[in-house]
Image (cartoon, grey):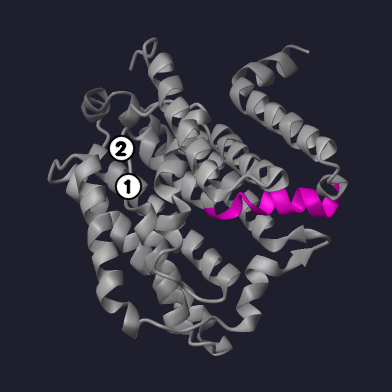
């Protein structure tokens, strides 16, 4: 019994978020008579709304735990999606090296972000915003020569399923479990928490804080690359606006903060972040069921971001690094 109570206390935020989201989702489905949303297919469709944002939020979680932030993720997603379709050119034989190439580029961009912040002392906001603008400029200039499509077999990533469960959902779950293990059961995870909690103390304890931050940003870049690969599979081709129009930069930050991670770093969890992503997926599904127009949808999502920052401000008053 004590163990169960301890588990509930440690995961109170994600449990509360998921419970509230489920109640709103089920209530809306019943109220609108859309009972199909409560079937296995409907629930899997809800979970599939989490994939792209979930992958990005996992990477953003690593960065924010270290006391940093990444505003380049949206444009990096677009770059990754465009490069994926350009490298593949509709040829199944190109899938392997295209995936590897995209992930290497994405990790390299994340590493550049980390070096600018950790080694040159550039503000995370300025560094990642600047890198994001560079990526956006490259897309704008080079898009006419970066056209292509992904082969039909590659679209199994977005549309395939195993025993009724989408492959992409299984992939997200696997990455979430791996991220949770890395943060709670490895030395690297402990060092990341230490750097985010108090960088000076971590440095005095012999931790290479710059290396930890660079690694966290490289992970954020890698996860953004994976999100771009997924969206390329979903759309059948990469588009230069898929990341920016998706709002993955602010939404990923909001999801991480809603899930209990401090913007100042040093405290947070993967379960909380996934619960935050589930909140956004539920909001999208509810908007669709209620047939709310896209403009109002964006307004309400913006309010969620504001509330998330407000919740962070309230919590951080009592946080002592």
Q: Is residue 205 magenta?
A: no
> As rendered, which of 179 and 234 lies closer to the eye?
234
User: Answer yes or no: do the residues labelled 1 and 2 have beta carbons within 8 Å?
Assistant: no
Left or right: 80 as drawn, with respect to 141: right
Examine the rendering and report whether any part of residue 222 can be seen: no
Task: Give the secondary structure at mark 1.
Answer: loop
Q: Residue 31's spot in the image, x, y percent?
A: 82, 35
Furthest residue toward left: 120
Residue 123: name its quadrant. Answer: top left
Residue pictured at 42% horizontal, 14% vertical: 314
Q: Is residue 56 above or below residue 150?
A: above
> As rendered, which of 94 and 23 lies closer to the eye?
23
Q: Is residue 42 magenta?
A: yes
Residue pictured at 57% horizontal, 76% vertical: 236
Residue pictured at 25% horizontal, 32% vertical: 206
Magenta range: 39-52
Q: To which residue does mark 2 refer? A: 68
Q: Residues within 10 Å of mark 2 (few under 14, many from 20)?
A: many
Instruction: Give me the C-alpha separation between circle 1 and circle 2.
Output: 10 Å
Left or right: 115 as drawn, with respect to 105: left
Q: Is residue 254 above or below residue 51?
A: above
Q: Residue 187's spot in the image, x, y percent?
A: 43, 37
> As rendered, which of 191 and 101 lies closer to the eye?
101
User: Which of the labelled discs sits on residue 165, or is there none?
Assistant: none
Task: Give the secondary structure at mark 2.
Answer: loop
Q: Residues within 10 Å of mark 1 (few under 14, many from 20)?
A: many
Quarter of the image with the N terminus is top right
> As rendered, which of 229 and 207 lies closer to the eye?
229
Q: To which residue does mark 1 refer? A: 71
């Amino acid at each position: 019994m004590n163990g169960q109570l301890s588990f509930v206390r440690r995961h109170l935020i994600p449990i509360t978020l998921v419970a509230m989201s489920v109640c709103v989702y089920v209530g809306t489905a019943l109220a609108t008579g859309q009972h199909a949303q409560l079937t296995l297919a409907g629930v899997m469709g809800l979970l599939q709304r989490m994939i792209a944002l979930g992958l990005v939020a996992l990477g953003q979680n690593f960065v924010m735990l270290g006391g940093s932030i990444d505003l380049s993720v949206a444009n990096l997603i677009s770059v990754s999606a465009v490069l994926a379709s350009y490298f593949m050119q509709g040829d199944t034989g190109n899938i392997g090296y295209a995936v590897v190439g995209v992930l290497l580029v994405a990790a390299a961009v994340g590493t550049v972000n980390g070096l600018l912040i950790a080694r040159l002392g550039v503000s995370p906001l300025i560094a990642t915003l600047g890198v994001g603008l560079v990526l956006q400029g490259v897309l704008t200039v080079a898009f006419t020569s970066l056209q292509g499509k992904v082969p039909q077999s590659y679209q199994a990533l977005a549309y395939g399923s195993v025993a009724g469960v989408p492959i992409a959902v299984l992939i997200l779950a696997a990455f979430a479990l791996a991220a949770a293990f890395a943060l709670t059961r490895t030395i690297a995870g402990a060092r990341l928490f230490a750097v985010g909690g108090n960088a000076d103390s971590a440095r005095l304890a012999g931790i290479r804080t710059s290396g930890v931050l660079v690694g966290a940003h490289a992970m954020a870049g890698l996860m953004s690359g994976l999100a771009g690969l997924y969206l390329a599979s979903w759309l059948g081709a990469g588009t230069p606006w898929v990341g920016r129009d998706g709002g993955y930069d602010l939404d990923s930050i909001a999801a991480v903060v809603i899930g209990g991670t401090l913007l100042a770093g040093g405290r947070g969890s993967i379960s909380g972040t996934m619960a935050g992503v589930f909140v956004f997926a539920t909001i999208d599904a509810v908007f669709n069921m209620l047939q709310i127009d896209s403009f109002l949808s964006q307004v309400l999502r913006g309010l969620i971001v504001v509330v998330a920052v407000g919740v962070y401000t309230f919590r951080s008053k009592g946080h002592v690094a």
